[in-house]
């Protein structure tokens, strides 16, 4: 199943967090927090401004982004968890 987000929404696949600390301690699954970094898989067309024009999205498919801990809505696609959030909830794009 494929999905295309509407308007100013973005489909994100969460990136896995490290399971070890810098000191080598392994973090159990029950103590892990959900990652706040992800990969953009799909974007909407943009949002409609007050004058009726569509403002295009600034993020694109393939961007690595940071987002807030409680941002968006979680959905399951093909048995995998994804996140749909508004572009305004994205805190920044990670540039390598």
Image (cartoon, rainbow, N blue to C red):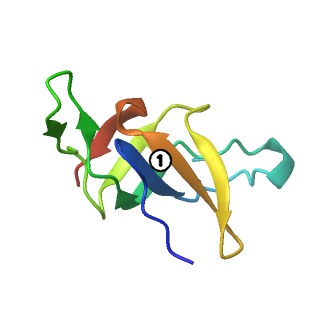
Q: Position of residue 7 (x, y in %)?
A: 35, 44
The answer to whether residue 88 shows anywhere in this view is yes
Left or right, residue 3 beside residue 19: left
- Choose top left, top right, bottom left or bottom right for residue 79: bottom right
Which residue is under mark 1? 37
Question: Residue at (42%, 31%) from the top-left corner?
Answer: 89
Q: x and y percent of residue 77 in the render?
A: 63, 69
Judge by depth and name the residue closer to the eye, 46 or 67.
46
- Residue extending furthest toward the right: 30
The answer to whether 63 is drawn above or below residue 37 in the figure is below
Q: Quadrant of the N terminus?
A: bottom right
Quarter of the image where the C terminus is located? bottom left
Which is more toward the observer, 17 or 5?
5
Residue visible at 36% across and 30% down in the picture: 88
In the displayed structure, does residue 7 sit left or right of residue 52? right
Q: Quadrant of residue 33?
A: top right
Residue 25 in the image: state x and y as whole percent. Answer: 72, 50
Kindly identify the residue that appears in the image at 27 percent across and 51 percent down: 45
Measuring from the top left, give residue 12's x and y in whole percent: 47, 55
Q: How many marks?
A: 1
Q: Is residue 39 above or below residue 87?
A: below
Q: Is residue 67 left or right of residue 71?
A: left
């Amino acid at each position: 199943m494929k999905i295309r987000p509407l308007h100013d929404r973005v489909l994100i696949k969460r990136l896995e967090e490290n399971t070890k600390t810098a000191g080598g301690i392994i973090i159990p699954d029950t103590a892990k927090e959900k990652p706040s970094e992800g990969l953009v898989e799909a974007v909407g067309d943009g949002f409609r401004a007050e004058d009726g024009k569509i403002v295009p999205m600034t993020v694109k498919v393939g961007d690595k982004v940071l987002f807030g801990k409680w941002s968006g809505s979680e959905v399951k696609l093909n048995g995998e968890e994804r996140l749909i959030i508004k572009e305004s909830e994205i805190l920044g794009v990670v540039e390598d």
